[in-house]
Amino acid sequence: RKERKGARCPVHGVNLIESSDQLYAPYLQRPFPLTDDIIVERRVMLSRRSTASGPASFKLDKRQRVQDRIEIAHRLQKTQLLSDMKAFKAANPSAVFQDFTSWYGNPGNPLDDYTGDADASQQSRNRFPQSAAVKLDNASEAIQILTSIREFWTDTWEEATACPAVKQQPLFDVFSTVERVLDYLETMHPAGLLNQVLSVNLSMSHFTLLASAGEAIHVSIVQAALEKLRVNIEFALKLLSRDVTNGTCPALSDNAGFERLPKHASSEAIAACEIVCNSITDAEALLCRALSLLHKFPMQYDLVNKILRRTDGDMIQCDGKEGRMEILKAIQRNGSQESTDDEPIPQPSLREYLLRNRDESNPCQMCVRFGDKSTETGENNGRGGLLLALTKCSGE
């Protein structure tokens, strides 16, 4: 019996076809990270556009063009697939190709991974009826792709030798990646650089406001403002990402008739960023007011929410006893502030508070005025007083 190497865990209920041994899932290398610029480059390589000069040339070499695209896709796939097959053979020494596909999954169309138009093409085919010739042509292309994929996977399986992932050559090539990054930065358009800087700043703005919200996050109007900001930022980032893609490869633009200012910026993305800036201003102002009110009315999230939602001239209904007590305590704290030597606070000579009810049929209000006692040289000279006035009306 051969030794298993690089086995991670058994796959319950699955046995190898020839030996009936337990099938083990191996440790695999992490896939190569794909950035937006790499995806765009691969979309260009797998583009459906042809250099043919006419319909006759298009028909003659269509099969060859499809085969060329498949071979490019297979070259992009082979490194990861070969590594996974090696790790699987090391963990399952007596496995056959069918064992690998039953665990790894059946191969799909590699052309759909980067073209980005598979769903749109499928919807277009479903929406409009196709002629028999078009259906036959599509079926012939599908058979050609399926046959090529089957041959590619079989040849790769024969080429793979048992080797656990820990002993394989890393898929991520540090030196070539650094060279690619430096080349990308050297040839980057200034608009693309500003696009990426703006994307980072917009994302960090939401994170900063959310992290500094503290207990104000429990106020519903603050939650709504931050959620609105998040939605606006996600929409703006989507448009900015599309502009980067279209700027790198304008021929792959999803909307050919889309209004564009320069080559690398769209008016729609600029308008979305302006909306985000306005949302940041509103959320920041609302958050500051909420934190200030919660400092005066601790834990009174419903009361603070009502205060923030009101407009000028609106009455605030405070039904809870705790809310009313917090208002009175805030008034008491405001009236009992003492002066300090470092920052002397002048005491007002007169304070006035006006309390009104919300009953329109029997409106009434109470006016409270009181003067502070003078404490000159630490002695009380007896000045000060309290005046209460109640006004009540009855509706006719």
Image (cartoon, rainbow, N blue to C red):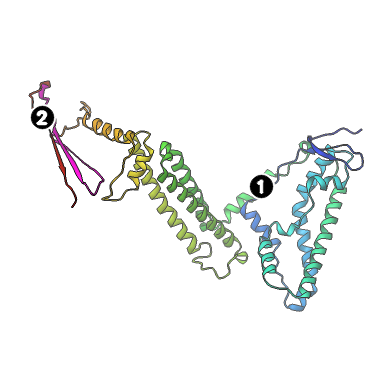
Q: Position of residue 266 (x, y in %)?
A: 50, 63
Q: Nearer the viewer, residue 150 or 319?
A: 319
Residue 362 in view = yes
Disc 1 marks which amino acid? Pro
Magenta-drawn segment: 349-377
Residue 312, numbered circle: none
Which residue corresponds to mark 1? 33
Q: How many marks?
A: 2
Task: Judge left or right: residue 344 versus residue 108.
Answer: left
Which residue corresponds to mark 2? 384
* Sooner in the amino-acid sequence: mark 1 or mark 2: 1
Inspect the magenta stretch and tell me whether residue 375 lies in it: yes
Q: Nearer the viewer, residue 382 or 172?
A: 382
Label 1 to label 2: alpha-carbon separation: 76 Å
Q: Residue at x 19, y 42 (%)?
A: 365
Residue 163 in view = no
Inspect the magenta stretch and tell me whether residue 37 lies in it: no
Q: Residue at x 11, y 27 (%)?
A: 374
Q: Nearer the viewer, residue 286 or 86?
A: 286
Disc 2 marks which amino acid? Gly
- The quadrant in which the N terminus is found is top right
Task: Judge left or right: residue 128 versus residue 71.
Answer: left
Q: Position of residue 65 (x, y in %)?
A: 77, 67
Q: Residues within 10 Å of mark 2 (few under 14, many from 20)?
A: few
Q: Residue at x 29, y 35 (%)?
A: 324
Element type at marker 1? loop
